[in-house]
Amino acid sequence: MTTDYEQFIVNIKRKTGIDLALYKEAQMKRRLTSLYEKRGFKSFSEFFKGIERDQKLLNEFLDRMTINVSEFYRNGKRWEVLQNKILPRLLQNNKRLKIWSAACSTGEEPYSLAMVLSNYLPLSQISILATDIDENAIAKAKAGVYPERSIVEVPANIKTKYFEQNGAFFKVKDEIKRTVTFKKHNLLKDTYDSNFDLIVCRNVMIYFTEEAKDKIYQSFSHALHSGGVLFVGSTEQIFNPARYSFDIEDTFFYRKM
């Protein structure tokens, strides 16, 4: 017999193309149950009926499902490694790097990438693709307005150069915004572009099943050219990198063989 949650997975996949079965069940179930209870529903089937009727509730479901927790220069030491070790090597061969910030959430990560790259290149030569499954997150990313807590890790000189303060909020300057192109993309379903020099995908794999992770890492490997780098989050070490044709270049940085 199909459980209430299993039927919900089927319904959501039919409606949105998102396969919740590829996300860790206990974690996802807990998160979505707290949302539907807060909205006055008593079951996943009731909740889905609500989603069918109400676009706002669908957006809220997508928001909760993807959990947009991000900040600029998150885990600052890794960004130093990117700036001082990874980028200089990549830039030796090519000054026009092809870069993808995958599952970019509300934009802190691709904008951080542009700011780090600006140490080496004029902004006119920087072009970053940033994608996420959540259109709400992408809309926030395009607006580029953040609370102070999002920028605590940003070096002081970068903060002064690339942000405008407006009351309690900080706005990314247009010259940085112009370096990033935002698009909707589902890592588990959509096709991947190829020949990337650098793919950054941090703090999202923790939500996926082992099967889904395997599929995504294979896809990332195919999307990188030889010598390209995958930069992952600080809880997302790849335990068998050779399986995906990766070498460890530094902690949380994997070079395509």
Image: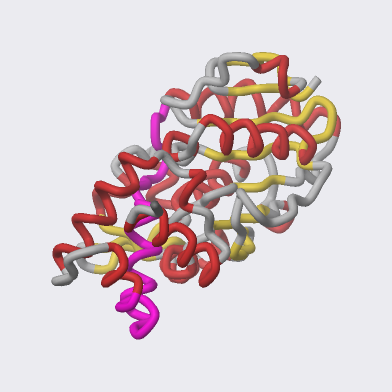
Say if the magenta span includes residue 10.
Answer: no
Instruction: Say which residue appears at 61% left-offset and 59% top-offset.
Output: 185
Image-based side of 232 in relation to 226, left or right: left
- At which x and y percent is residue 118? 61, 45
Q: Nearer the viewer, residue 48 or 62?
A: 48
Could you tell me what secondary structure mostly forms the magenta stretch? Answer: helix
Instruction: Say which residue appears at 59% left-offset and 47% top-offset.
Output: 101
- At which x and y percent is residue 131? 59, 57
In the figure, 140 relative to 120: above or below?
A: below
Q: Residue furthest bottom?
A: 53
Q: Which residues are magenta?
A: 49-76
Image-based side of 133 in relation to 29, left or right: right
Q: Which of the 4 image quarters holds residue 32?
A: bottom left
Image-based side of 60 in relation to 139, left or right: left
Instruction: Say which residue appears at 27% left-offset and 72% top-offset.
Output: 46
How many numbered markers are drawn? 0
- At which x and y percent is residue 122? 69, 50
